[in-house]
Image (tube, rainbow, N blue to C red):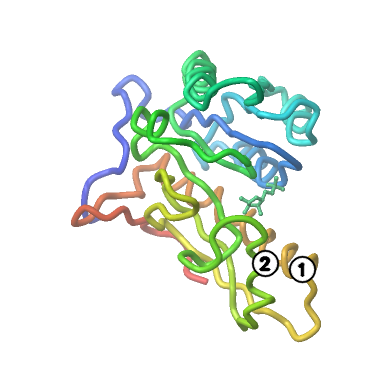
Amino acid sequence: MPGTPLIERAPCSAGDPLRLGVLVSGSGSNLAAVLDAARDPARALRVAAVLSNVAGVRALERAVAAGVPALVEDHKGRSREAFEDAVDAALRAHRVEVVVLAGFMRVLTAHFLERWKHRVLNVHPALCPAFPGMHAPRQALAHGVRVTGCTVHLVDAGVDTGPILAQAAVPVLDDDDEAALTSRIQAEEHRLFPAVLSALAQGRVRLVDGRPRACGLAAR
Ligand code: GRF
């Protein structure tokens, strides 16, 4: 394989599953897909903690049902730095190696990201750099594109702008509404996100000429 692994793991963790901290704010269907994948030892993934900035969301219930620590850090009434420091401390307390944004509705700043360089991944329901931010399927329909999709990328301080690791294309059908298109995109997210995380755990996400590249993902 070309290049060098994107993340270095401590020698004592070689062969152990990659410890994920999943940040959520809502329903957690992507969390469910990652939890499912983590049941297969061949995927080399473990969800070490799930953390929400909103109490009572469905994603936290999914974590509890899976026997995973379900944590809440409310962003309200705190500075961004104080909120991010609390999230950082909670993740480290659970020995998280990689942070997974799965419907997490807060923008993380450089204050947090510099401490987790190359270790924060997001899934976005569009083919980046198209349609960043909220309501990407609605934006796709408004623009009349015939193909959209989803993107797994490293997180930088922008909104859905970090280096792209993998994408999957999804057709827009003539009679699509926002709900139908969103659900077709999410089905692809649920396949792609765990596949990229597994690739990362197995050293198949590599820096090649300074650009991260996921190797050995099935082409679609
Ligand atoms: C997903 O569509 C993801 O692309 C976006 O937020 C949504 C979260 O959905 N970032 P869920 O909470 O995983 O069901």
Residue at image position (32%, 37%) is 7
* Residue 191 place in picture, x, y as percent: 61, 56
Residue projecting furthest to the top: 93
Q: Is mark 1 within 8 Å of ligand 1?
A: no
Question: Is the residue under label 1 in contact with that under label 2 (CB below 8 Å)?
Answer: yes
Callout 1: SS: helix
Q: Residue furthest left?
A: 209
Q: Which residue is drawn at the image coordinates 53% and 23% (left, top)? A: 79
| Residue 50 spot, x, y in % from top left | 63, 28
SS at mark 2 in the image: helix
**Residue 143 percent across, percent down from the top left:** 62, 79
Residue closer to the observer: 68 or 114: 114
Q: Relative to 121, say whether 131 is above or below.
A: below
Q: Residue at x 29, y 49 (%)?
A: 206
* Residue that mark 1 sits on: 178
Under mark 2, the amino acid is Pro
Horizontally, residue 130 falls left or right of residue 156, namely right
What residue does disc 2 label? 137
Q: Quadrant of residue 5?
A: top left
Left or right placement of residue 178 versus residue 145 in this view: right
- 213 left or right of 3 in image: right
Q: Quadrant of residue 8?
A: top left
